[in-house]
Amino acid sequence: MREAERDGAAGAKEAEVAAIERAMVALRRSAARRTPARRAARQGGGPVPEGAAFDVLDVVEAAEERGEPAGVREVADALRVDQPRASKLVAAAVQAGHLRREADQADGRRTLLAVTPAGRELLEAAHAFRRSVVARVTRDWPATERAAFARLFTRFMDDFGATNGPSGED
């Protein structure tokens, strides 16, 4: 490849990376404006955790789906916060009735977390809402493009997590 072709390829790659970065910023800003608590308030629902408090439920649910135990340490690692902060978030979720603490049968010194029926209901509502947004946004996309986006975005997030840790922050 000649130098001019390399420079052109580098410029195209740079433009693509910049476009992805702008899209990520727009997605983050959009997601920050649509918190579960605000939706619940509009719909007359009760108090709903938001931000990191809601992320705790996502972390514990994901661990359950993988068949792995989740305790405060796993929550702290996944959210990239210190253990005292994770402990406060977990305590709030337990007090709200969204999580329960259980003894670890393999290690009596350890306490594990489990999603309660109320927490599961909250998570299912959040999943349904998120999926409805994705379905609405992609409703006019050809099936092949939607499938390609699902594959590529999943790959991107897997690689992003492997590069930057579970929460994608350095």
Image (cartoon, grey):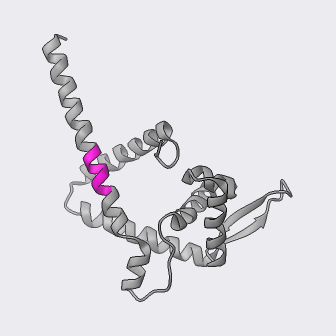
Q: How many marks?
A: 0
157 lies above or below 44 = above
Q: Is residue 30 left or right of residue 159?
A: left
The residue positioned farthest toward the right in the image shown: 108
Front-most of residues 160 and 105: 160
Front-most of residues 112 and 30: 30
The residue positioned farthest toward the top in the image shown: 2
The residue positioned farthest toward the bottom in the image shown: 44
Residue 67 in sight here: no
Front-most of residues 127 and 141: 127
x, y percentage for residue 30?
Answer: 30, 62
Q: Quadrant of residue 131?
A: bottom left
Q: Is residue 146 left or right of residue 88?
A: left
Residue 168 in sight here: yes
x, y percentage for residue 159?
Answer: 44, 38
Q: Residue at x 66, y 73 (%)?
A: 94
Q: Is residue 80 left or right of residue 21?
A: right
Q: Quadrant of residue 27?
A: bottom left
x, y percentage for residue 43?
Answer: 38, 86
x, y percentage for residue 88?
Answer: 64, 66
Magenta-colored stretch includes residue 37: no
Q: Residue at x 61, y 78 (%)?
A: 96
Q: Which residues are magenta?
A: 21-27
Q: Residue at x 56, y 50 (%)?
A: 80
